[in-house]
Image (tube, rainbow, N blue to C red):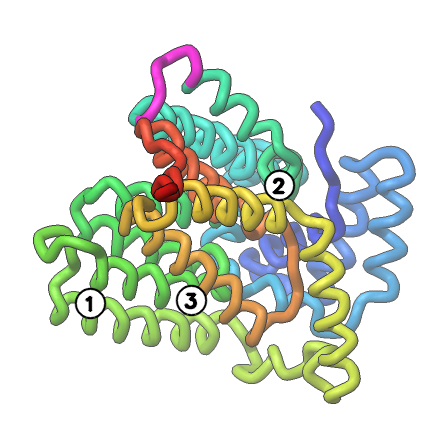
Amino acid sequence: MLPGNNGDLPYYIATALTKDGKTDQQALSETKFIVRAEVTGWKQGALLHQMEIAEKNILDYYRIKPLYVFIIHFLHKAGFSFVTATLIPSLLSYFGIGCLVFSWCMKILKPLPALIFSMILLFINPCIILARLSSPDAVSNIFLFYSLYRIYFGKKYYWTALILMTSLFIRLDNFISVFVLLTLMQMWPGKQKQIHFGTFLICMFLTVILAVGINFLYEPEFWWFLRVTYLQSVSAYGLQVLIYFLSVSQSFLPSLILIGCIEYFMIGNSIPKTTLYVLTSIACIIFIRFLFFPSFEERFMTGYYLTAFLVLLEPFLSGKQVQKPSSIHK
Protein backbone atom coordinates (compact mmCIF):
# COMPACT_ATOMS: atom_id res chain seq x y z
CA MET A 1 0.00 0.00 0.00
CA LEU A 2 2.91 2.35 0.70
CA PRO A 3 6.04 1.26 -1.21
CA GLY A 4 9.30 2.80 -0.09
CA ASN A 5 10.45 3.66 -3.64
CA ASN A 6 13.98 3.74 -2.25
CA GLY A 7 16.91 5.09 -4.23
CA ASP A 8 18.03 1.65 -5.43
CA LEU A 9 14.71 0.98 -7.19
CA PRO A 10 15.62 2.28 -10.69
CA TYR A 11 18.98 0.50 -10.73
CA TYR A 12 17.50 -2.90 -9.93
CA ILE A 13 14.96 -2.37 -12.70
CA ALA A 14 17.70 -1.34 -15.12
CA THR A 15 19.84 -4.35 -14.16
CA ALA A 16 16.83 -6.62 -14.81
CA LEU A 17 16.37 -4.97 -18.23
CA THR A 18 19.95 -5.83 -19.20
CA LYS A 19 18.90 -9.49 -19.07
CA ASP A 20 16.97 -8.82 -22.29
CA GLY A 21 20.21 -7.92 -24.06
CA LYS A 22 20.06 -4.16 -23.53
CA THR A 23 23.21 -2.19 -22.80
CA ASP A 24 23.50 -0.34 -19.50
CA GLN A 25 22.66 3.00 -21.10
CA GLN A 26 19.66 1.59 -22.97
CA ALA A 27 18.39 -0.03 -19.77
CA LEU A 28 18.82 3.18 -17.76
CA SER A 29 17.02 5.22 -20.43
CA GLU A 30 14.08 2.79 -20.47
CA THR A 31 14.00 2.79 -16.68
CA LYS A 32 13.35 6.55 -16.70
CA PHE A 33 10.13 5.94 -18.66
CA ILE A 34 9.18 3.19 -16.20
CA VAL A 35 9.76 5.48 -13.20
CA ARG A 36 7.59 8.20 -14.78
CA ALA A 37 4.82 5.66 -15.40
CA GLU A 38 4.90 3.72 -12.10
CA VAL A 39 6.12 6.18 -9.43
CA THR A 40 4.10 9.20 -8.39
CA GLY A 41 4.64 12.27 -6.22
CA TRP A 42 7.93 13.81 -5.22
CA LYS A 43 9.65 10.41 -5.22
CA GLN A 44 9.41 10.34 -9.01
CA GLY A 45 11.37 13.58 -9.39
CA ALA A 46 13.90 12.52 -6.75
CA LEU A 47 14.59 9.19 -8.48
CA LEU A 48 14.90 10.80 -11.93
CA HIS A 49 17.29 13.47 -10.59
CA GLN A 50 19.35 10.78 -8.88
CA MET A 51 19.64 8.87 -12.16
CA GLU A 52 20.80 12.00 -13.98
CA ILE A 53 23.78 12.50 -11.64
CA ALA A 54 24.63 8.81 -11.16
CA GLU A 55 28.14 7.60 -12.04
CA LYS A 56 28.69 5.91 -15.39
CA ASN A 57 29.06 2.32 -14.17
CA ILE A 58 26.39 2.49 -11.48
CA LEU A 59 24.90 -0.92 -12.38
CA ASP A 60 28.12 -2.66 -11.31
CA TYR A 61 26.91 -2.30 -7.72
CA TYR A 62 23.68 -4.19 -8.53
CA ARG A 63 24.80 -6.99 -10.83
CA ILE A 64 26.32 -8.88 -7.87
CA LYS A 65 22.81 -9.68 -6.58
CA PRO A 66 21.85 -12.03 -9.43
CA LEU A 67 19.11 -14.01 -7.67
CA TYR A 68 17.11 -10.90 -6.74
CA VAL A 69 17.55 -9.46 -10.24
CA PHE A 70 16.42 -12.78 -11.75
CA ILE A 71 13.28 -12.75 -9.54
CA ILE A 72 12.43 -9.20 -10.71
CA HIS A 73 12.91 -10.21 -14.34
CA PHE A 74 10.81 -13.36 -13.89
CA LEU A 75 7.94 -11.57 -12.10
CA HIS A 76 7.84 -8.84 -14.74
CA LYS A 77 7.67 -11.44 -17.50
CA ALA A 78 4.81 -13.05 -15.51
CA GLY A 79 2.81 -9.83 -15.84
CA PHE A 80 3.65 -7.68 -12.82
CA SER A 81 4.74 -4.07 -13.15
CA PHE A 82 8.43 -3.47 -12.47
CA VAL A 83 7.88 -1.64 -9.17
CA THR A 84 5.56 -4.40 -7.94
CA ALA A 85 8.06 -7.03 -9.09
CA THR A 86 10.74 -5.43 -6.90
CA LEU A 87 8.41 -5.41 -3.86
CA ILE A 88 6.96 -8.94 -3.99
CA PRO A 89 10.22 -10.61 -2.79
CA SER A 90 10.36 -8.17 0.13
CA LEU A 91 6.75 -8.77 1.16
CA LEU A 92 7.05 -12.57 0.95
CA SER A 93 10.33 -12.51 2.87
CA TYR A 94 8.80 -10.30 5.58
CA PHE A 95 5.97 -12.80 5.94
CA GLY A 96 8.51 -15.65 6.13
CA ILE A 97 10.54 -13.81 8.78
CA GLY A 98 7.34 -13.38 10.80
CA CYS A 99 6.61 -17.12 10.60
CA LEU A 100 10.13 -17.93 11.79
CA VAL A 101 9.95 -15.44 14.67
CA PHE A 102 6.61 -16.91 15.80
CA SER A 103 7.99 -20.46 15.49
CA TRP A 104 11.02 -19.50 17.61
CA CYS A 105 8.84 -17.76 20.22
CA MET A 106 6.56 -20.81 20.42
CA LYS A 107 9.55 -22.86 21.55
CA ILE A 108 10.12 -20.66 24.60
CA LEU A 109 6.70 -19.10 25.29
CA LYS A 110 3.04 -20.05 25.48
CA PRO A 111 0.98 -19.31 22.32
CA LEU A 112 -0.55 -15.94 23.30
CA PRO A 113 2.71 -14.38 24.62
CA ALA A 114 4.50 -15.84 21.57
CA LEU A 115 2.03 -14.10 19.27
CA ILE A 116 2.37 -10.76 21.10
CA PHE A 117 6.19 -10.93 21.21
CA SER A 118 6.31 -11.86 17.53
CA MET A 119 4.13 -8.93 16.53
CA ILE A 120 6.18 -6.47 18.58
CA LEU A 121 9.44 -7.75 17.10
CA LEU A 122 8.03 -7.45 13.57
CA PHE A 123 6.99 -3.85 14.25
CA ILE A 124 10.49 -2.59 15.11
CA ASN A 125 11.79 -0.32 12.36
CA PRO A 126 14.74 -2.43 11.10
CA CYS A 127 12.24 -5.25 10.50
CA ILE A 128 9.08 -3.59 9.22
CA ILE A 129 10.95 -1.33 6.78
CA LEU A 130 12.08 -4.41 4.86
CA ALA A 131 8.55 -5.03 3.58
CA ARG A 132 8.47 -1.64 1.81
CA LEU A 133 11.84 -1.65 0.08
CA SER A 134 12.72 -2.50 -3.49
CA SER A 135 15.91 -4.30 -2.52
CA PRO A 136 17.22 -7.82 -1.80
CA ASP A 137 17.67 -7.00 1.90
CA ALA A 138 14.53 -8.79 3.10
CA VAL A 139 15.38 -11.89 1.07
CA SER A 140 18.95 -11.85 2.40
CA ASN A 141 17.70 -11.47 5.97
CA ILE A 142 15.34 -14.42 5.81
CA PHE A 143 18.10 -16.68 4.46
CA LEU A 144 20.54 -15.66 7.20
CA PHE A 145 17.90 -15.67 9.95
CA TYR A 146 16.68 -19.13 8.91
CA SER A 147 20.28 -20.37 8.90
CA LEU A 148 20.77 -19.12 12.48
CA TYR A 149 17.43 -20.69 13.44
CA ARG A 150 18.57 -24.04 12.05
CA ILE A 151 21.96 -23.84 13.74
CA TYR A 152 20.48 -22.90 17.11
CA PHE A 153 17.91 -25.70 17.09
CA GLY A 154 20.28 -28.35 15.74
CA LYS A 155 18.71 -28.91 12.30
CA LYS A 156 20.55 -30.95 9.63
CA TYR A 157 23.63 -28.99 8.67
CA TYR A 158 23.70 -30.00 4.99
CA TRP A 159 20.61 -27.93 4.27
CA THR A 160 21.88 -25.11 6.47
CA ALA A 161 25.16 -24.98 4.52
CA LEU A 162 23.22 -24.98 1.22
CA ILE A 163 21.01 -22.10 2.41
CA LEU A 164 24.07 -20.12 3.47
CA MET A 165 25.83 -20.59 0.14
CA THR A 166 22.65 -19.70 -1.77
CA SER A 167 22.61 -16.38 0.11
CA LEU A 168 25.72 -15.39 -1.87
CA PHE A 169 23.52 -15.09 -4.96
CA ILE A 170 21.29 -12.62 -3.12
CA ARG A 171 24.03 -10.33 -1.83
CA LEU A 172 27.67 -11.08 -2.56
CA ASP A 173 28.78 -9.32 0.64
CA ASN A 174 27.07 -12.15 2.54
CA PHE A 175 30.32 -14.08 2.13
CA ILE A 176 31.43 -12.69 5.52
CA SER A 177 28.31 -14.04 7.21
CA VAL A 178 28.69 -17.39 5.44
CA PHE A 179 32.31 -17.80 6.58
CA VAL A 180 31.45 -16.95 10.19
CA LEU A 181 28.30 -19.08 10.37
CA LEU A 182 30.01 -22.09 8.80
CA THR A 183 32.69 -21.71 11.47
CA LEU A 184 29.95 -21.51 14.11
CA MET A 185 28.48 -24.78 12.80
CA GLN A 186 31.88 -26.45 13.08
CA MET A 187 32.48 -25.20 16.66
CA TRP A 188 28.91 -25.67 17.93
CA PRO A 189 28.69 -27.20 21.45
CA GLY A 190 28.17 -30.95 21.29
CA LYS A 191 30.11 -32.89 18.68
CA GLN A 192 27.00 -34.70 17.46
CA LYS A 193 25.58 -31.36 16.30
CA GLN A 194 28.77 -30.04 14.69
CA ILE A 195 29.36 -30.07 10.95
CA HIS A 196 32.05 -32.61 10.06
CA PHE A 197 35.44 -30.97 9.64
CA GLY A 198 35.88 -32.33 6.11
CA THR A 199 32.44 -31.04 5.11
CA PHE A 200 33.29 -27.71 6.74
CA LEU A 201 36.45 -27.35 4.60
CA ILE A 202 34.54 -28.30 1.43
CA CYS A 203 31.83 -25.71 2.21
CA MET A 204 34.43 -23.01 2.87
CA PHE A 205 36.15 -23.83 -0.42
CA LEU A 206 32.83 -23.76 -2.31
CA THR A 207 32.01 -20.41 -0.71
CA VAL A 208 35.25 -18.91 -2.06
CA ILE A 209 34.61 -20.42 -5.51
CA LEU A 210 31.04 -19.11 -5.60
CA ALA A 211 32.01 -15.62 -4.42
CA VAL A 212 34.81 -15.31 -6.97
CA GLY A 213 32.66 -16.90 -9.69
CA ILE A 214 29.72 -14.54 -9.14
CA ASN A 215 32.03 -11.53 -9.24
CA PHE A 216 33.76 -12.84 -12.37
CA LEU A 217 30.59 -13.81 -14.28
CA TYR A 218 28.37 -10.84 -13.48
CA GLU A 219 30.84 -7.96 -13.39
CA PRO A 220 32.60 -6.63 -16.51
CA GLU A 221 35.47 -5.42 -14.30
CA PHE A 222 36.63 -7.84 -11.57
CA TRP A 223 38.04 -5.13 -9.27
CA TRP A 224 35.02 -2.82 -9.65
CA PHE A 225 34.65 -2.43 -5.85
CA LEU A 226 37.94 -0.49 -5.66
CA ARG A 227 36.02 2.48 -7.08
CA VAL A 228 34.11 2.85 -3.79
CA THR A 229 34.72 6.41 -2.56
CA TYR A 230 35.95 5.62 0.95
CA LEU A 231 38.69 3.37 -0.44
CA GLN A 232 40.26 6.22 -2.36
CA SER A 233 42.15 7.77 0.57
CA VAL A 234 42.85 7.40 4.27
CA SER A 235 40.94 10.60 5.09
CA ALA A 236 37.87 9.39 3.14
CA TYR A 237 38.00 6.06 4.99
CA GLY A 238 38.35 7.87 8.34
CA LEU A 239 35.31 10.04 7.58
CA GLN A 240 33.32 6.92 6.69
CA VAL A 241 34.32 5.36 10.02
CA LEU A 242 32.98 8.42 11.87
CA ILE A 243 29.71 8.16 9.93
CA TYR A 244 29.60 4.45 10.79
CA PHE A 245 29.80 5.06 14.53
CA LEU A 246 27.22 7.83 14.30
CA SER A 247 24.86 5.38 12.57
CA VAL A 248 25.55 2.71 15.21
CA SER A 249 24.77 5.16 18.04
CA GLN A 250 21.36 5.85 16.46
CA SER A 251 20.59 2.18 15.82
CA PHE A 252 18.94 -0.67 17.72
CA LEU A 253 22.36 -2.22 18.45
CA PRO A 254 23.16 -0.29 21.68
CA SER A 255 19.84 -1.46 23.14
CA LEU A 256 20.73 -5.08 22.44
CA ILE A 257 24.17 -4.59 23.98
CA LEU A 258 22.50 -3.11 27.07
CA ILE A 259 20.14 -6.11 27.33
CA GLY A 260 23.16 -8.43 27.00
CA CYS A 261 25.03 -6.61 29.77
CA ILE A 262 22.00 -6.77 32.10
CA GLU A 263 21.68 -10.50 31.45
CA TYR A 264 25.38 -11.07 32.05
CA PHE A 265 25.37 -9.31 35.43
CA MET A 266 22.12 -10.99 36.46
CA ILE A 267 22.88 -14.53 35.33
CA GLY A 268 26.64 -14.60 34.79
CA ASN A 269 28.00 -18.09 34.25
CA SER A 270 24.50 -19.51 33.91
CA ILE A 271 24.14 -18.12 30.39
CA PRO A 272 23.94 -21.15 28.03
CA LYS A 273 26.93 -21.84 25.78
CA THR A 274 24.66 -21.83 22.75
CA THR A 275 23.61 -18.25 23.53
CA LEU A 276 27.24 -17.14 23.92
CA TYR A 277 28.28 -18.86 20.68
CA VAL A 278 25.47 -17.24 18.68
CA LEU A 279 26.12 -13.77 20.12
CA THR A 280 29.87 -14.11 19.53
CA SER A 281 29.31 -15.10 15.89
CA ILE A 282 27.02 -12.10 15.35
CA ALA A 283 29.63 -9.80 16.95
CA CYS A 284 32.30 -11.27 14.64
CA ILE A 285 30.12 -10.65 11.58
CA ILE A 286 29.53 -7.03 12.61
CA PHE A 287 33.25 -6.44 13.29
CA ILE A 288 34.51 -8.07 10.08
CA ARG A 289 31.89 -6.22 8.01
CA PHE A 290 33.13 -3.01 9.63
CA LEU A 291 36.70 -3.74 8.47
CA PHE A 292 35.61 -4.48 4.88
CA PHE A 293 32.57 -2.21 4.57
CA PRO A 294 32.51 0.59 7.19
CA SER A 295 28.93 1.43 6.30
CA PHE A 296 26.15 0.62 8.79
CA GLU A 297 22.65 0.07 7.45
CA GLU A 298 20.16 -1.29 9.99
CA ARG A 299 18.12 -3.18 7.41
CA PHE A 300 21.14 -5.45 6.81
CA MET A 301 21.08 -6.34 10.50
CA THR A 302 17.45 -7.40 10.97
CA GLY A 303 18.10 -11.15 11.04
CA TYR A 304 20.92 -10.67 13.56
CA TYR A 305 18.81 -8.34 15.74
CA LEU A 306 15.97 -10.86 15.89
CA THR A 307 18.32 -13.75 16.66
CA ALA A 308 20.16 -11.82 19.37
CA PHE A 309 16.93 -10.72 21.05
CA LEU A 310 15.46 -14.24 21.02
CA VAL A 311 18.56 -15.99 22.36
CA LEU A 312 18.88 -13.34 25.09
CA LEU A 313 15.21 -13.73 25.97
CA GLU A 314 15.35 -17.49 26.55
CA PRO A 315 17.61 -17.51 29.67
CA PHE A 316 15.37 -14.91 31.33
CA LEU A 317 12.40 -17.22 30.80
CA SER A 318 14.11 -20.38 32.01
CA GLY A 319 13.58 -19.65 35.68
CA LYS A 320 17.09 -18.31 36.38
CA GLN A 321 17.25 -16.14 39.45
CA VAL A 322 19.61 -13.32 40.26
CA GLN A 323 22.59 -14.77 42.07
CA LYS A 324 22.60 -13.49 45.63
CA PRO A 325 25.89 -12.64 47.35
CA SER A 326 26.94 -15.05 50.07
CA SER A 327 25.80 -14.04 53.52
CA ILE A 328 28.26 -12.06 55.59
CA HIS A 329 29.34 -13.73 58.82
CA LYS A 330 28.83 -11.55 61.83
Q: Tag 1, which secondary structure?
A: helix
The answer to which of marks 1 and 3 sits earlier in the sequence is 3
- Vertical side of 237 occupied by 187: above or below: above
The answer to which of marks 3 and 2 sits earlier in the sequence is 2
Q: Tag 2, which secondary structure?
A: helix
Question: For the point 26% across and 75% down, which residue is it?
Answer: 205
Give how far across and how far down residue 133 sits, in percent: 65, 41
Give how far across and how far down residue 160 sits, in percent: 26, 50
The answer to which of marks 1 and 2 sits earlier in the sequence is 2
Residue 175: assigned label = 3
Residue 126: assigned label = 2
Q: Which residues are magenta?
A: 108-113
In front here: 133 or 315? 315
Q: CA distance from mark 3 to mark 2?
A: 21 Å
- Vertical side of 33 occupied by 122: above or below: above
Q: Tag 3, which secondary structure?
A: helix
When asked about the image quadrant of residue 267, the answer is top left
Residue 81 visible somewhere in the drawing: no
Q: Disc 1 designates what residue?
A: 200
Seen in the image, is 91 located left or right of residue 322? Answer: right
Q: Residues within 10 Å of mark 1 (few under 14, many from 20)?
A: some
Question: For the point 89% across and 55% down, which residue is it?
Answer: 49
In front here: 166 or 146? 146
Quarter in which the N terminus is drawn: top right
Q: Are marks 3 and 2 in contact (CB under 8 Å)?
A: no
